[in-house]
Amino acid sequence: MKLAGENGVTRHFLLDIEMRLSPHTLTSYRYILTLLTETLELVCKIIDLEQVTVIHLRQCVQFLLTHHIQLEASRRPPANGLTLSISTIRGHIQVWKVFFNWCYQEELIEKNPVVRLSAPKPDDRVLPAFTEEQIQKMFMSLDTSTEMGFRDYLILLLLLDTGIRLSEITGLEVANVHDTYIKVMGKGRKEREVGIHPDVSKLLWKYIHKYRHPKDPDEKILFLGIGKGAGVPLGQGGVKHLMDRLKKATGIDHMRLSAHVFRHTFAKMYLKQGGDLFKLSRELGHSNVKTTQIYLKDFNSFDARKEHNSYSPINRFNLKKQLKNKKKQN
């Protein structure tokens, strides 16, 4: 059986699991499996499922670790301009294992090649986080008297206050915004509640009733585009564009500006203010607290929604004063 193509095994696998994955995760699976099939053909001359062995998969891992990716599936170059990071490859291997386990369970192969496949050891490094000064710079670079400025300011506040993922903030619906918490759809279509600070709750209400102007009255998504994409859902590209604008406006050019770094920042500041690791893990949507510990290697101290207000990073910023100062400046 061919791995790729219209009747390839990977395509039938993706069709089978489509309803169990979010659109974002499905896109990621498709990309990873396309890259795998291209690498197997290029490095190992393998195009059929039955031919794949653990040795071939190990060769693919080594290739991805040591070569600049210029294959058809690679839509953008790796961050370092040369190779995929170890953490990225570990994520790829997780998808490979899901795929080959599915093939084995469907009796498409007699031996499962991923049983003895080990992932490379992860980098032992501390993940980055924003400083209070950097966050203040981002806040002050936005004109909250405008529709776009207020929306962008609120996006930053929500990322900082909750640590939700990029896909979760762009998928957040108005109906899931409550006075003291929001409901988000996380990985694996798992819904969870995340606490929000009272000041953020007030600004969410103001955005919904004053600044949110949907093109379709029945639009469910909370954050909408402005300008050319006015009134339609703000996609992940829109949030990334916001981060690019912030980078230029603030001069923070020595580190990455992204929703993911806000996620790390939320977690670290939450713990610094006395939050509990296990309850933080629930708010972040981690299925295992060990994942949360990887985020927070520089912490050793060990509450989620009910005590969220006590530990939220928003306590460090006087939002009322900032908004008043903005009005005076304008």
Image: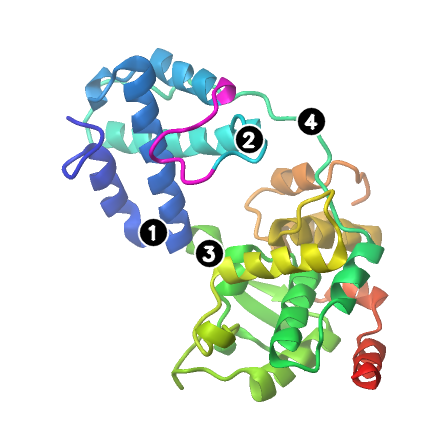
The range drawn in magenta is 65-76
* Picture disc at residue 227: none
Earlier along the polypeptide chain: callout 3 or callout 4?
4
Residue at the far top in the pictured view: 55
The front one of 16 and 229 is 229
* Picture disc at residue 190: 3
How would you classify the magenta stretch by its main secondary structure? loop
* Picture disc at residue 81: 2
The amino acid marked with disc number 1 is: Arg
Image quadrant containing the C terminus: bottom right
Disc number lying in front (4 or 2):
2
Is residue 70 part of the magenta span, yes or no? yes
Other-residue count near label 4 (Cα within 10 Å), few / some / many at <14 / 14–19 / ≥20: few
Are the residues at dot 4 and dot 2 in contact (C-beta closer than 8 Å)? no
* Picture disc at residue 124: 4
Other-residue count near label 3 (Cα within 10 Å), few / some / many at <14 / 14–19 / ≥20: few
* Picture disc at residue 20: 1
